Image: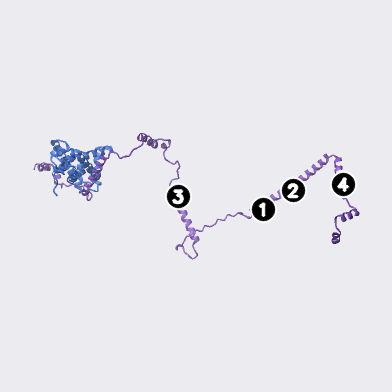
Amino acid sequence: MKQVEDEEILAKFSVERTRNEAFNLLISKYQEKIYWHVRRLVIDHDDADDLVQEVFIKVWKNLEKFRSDSKLYTWIYRIATNESITFLNKKKQQNNTPLDEVVEELSESLVASSYFNGDKIQMKLQQALLTLPEKQRLIFNMKYYDDLKYDEISEILGTSVGALKASFHIAVKKIEVFMLNEDISF
Amino acid sequence: MTTDVENNEWKAEAPYLASLPRTTPFRVPEQYFETLPSAITDSVYTERLKEEVKSAGYTVPENYFETLQESISLQTTGGALANIPKIQGYSTPDNYFEKLQASILAKTVAETSAIEQGARPAGQTSAEPTLAPVVKKETRIVRLWHSDLLKYASAACFILVTAFGLYLNQQNYTTESATADIANEQMLYDIDEQDIIDHVQGNVIEDKVLVPSEAELETYILNNYSQNELSTDL
């Protein structure tokens, strides 16, 4: 099925009569990408489900104000990223736990999750990702899984391309070391 | 092309990572992405509704929220009772309730089996169940007289008490008679002698019977009865 162009969605959304249709097209086009982006950050499916709905509510509310100086999907990614980071920060504040404990909690939910079907190596890769600082993890996910370009990630995160390249390089190195040195004990 | 180069340049630095399949190991529930659009549109609709209908239309009494906090704090922290821990103050021996249950059960089982054995018809073995359990409660007989000695001692006591009562009653009557005689004598002693003589003579006069003569009787009869009546009665 041919995906609708962003321009068409935006054009339809600007007309009152076709607004709902445009929004349905937008959901169909981006729901999976946004879900997986959020899911890789928050790990738990139910949390991801709630956040995806929040993201699209924000998209609905603010799409009228969207200016075409940035791409639609980078704009939606930015909303999703911000929502996910806010969620993780709230989790830290609510539990009043340091970052390493939050990482441990995420790691435990990864092991306990009934919606994980990877093998031991894939589990180890996810564990390695959880050892990264939040921003490095974000950059790695967008580069490794979503194949986004640096300038797109730069647009989403508001970080320079050079800083992104450095962060990604460091993240890759750390993961490679983790994967080769750490014992698999799951 | 730029993207490909950009996305592959790290592979030289991390060959092991590059050898792994780039798949997301997470799963989603079945039909999740089929139902997600409707879930999102429902959420969006609810959000729009909240924005359009700001107020729920309910009102509260004046100063309700000002007094609500006070009311809640009174109920939660106020009052001396709230500070008293909710413990009974009583205690039971260790494992009391565990033993109690077992004890009650043992007693009821023993009683039931005794009743069943008592109510079982002759010839019926214990293995055969009774059709209807007959609850035959044995009447407890309390003996009034525990021994003959007590019985006879009680009878003797009764006779003694009765005899003593009669004796006292008799003594009382004799005393009363003696007292009455003394009183009479004292009274006679106090009465003037002449009065007694007059009283006795008066009684003698009153006791005299007037005897009519034959002539007076004859006159009375002739005056009061007819000849016919006289001839009939005589």
Q: CA distance from mark 3 to mark 2?
A: 67 Å
Q: Label 1: which residue? A: B155
Contact check, label 1 and label 4, Cβ < 8 Å: no
Question: Hue of chain A?
Answer: blue
Question: Percent from the top left, x then y, of residue B134?
Answer: 49, 60
| Mark 4 nearby-residue class (10 Å; few <14, some 14–19, many ≥20) | few
Residue type, label 1: Ala
| Chain corresponding to purple in the figure | B
Question: Percent from the top left, x then y, of residue A33?
Answer: 18, 44
Q: Secondary structure at mark 4?
A: helix
Question: Percent from the top left, x then y, of residue B211?
Answer: 89, 52
Can residue B115 be seen in the rendering of this structure? yes
**Chain name for mark 1:** B
Residue type, label 4: Ile
Q: Which coloring applies here?
A: by chain
Q: Label 4: which residue? A: B205
Question: Which marked residue is nearer to the observer: mark 2 or mark 4?
Answer: 4
**Chain name for mark 3:** B
Let me know if marks 3 and 2 both belong to one chain: yes
Could you tell me which quadrant the C terminus of chain B lies in? bottom right
Q: Label 2: which residue? A: B170
As drawn, the label of residue B100 is: 3
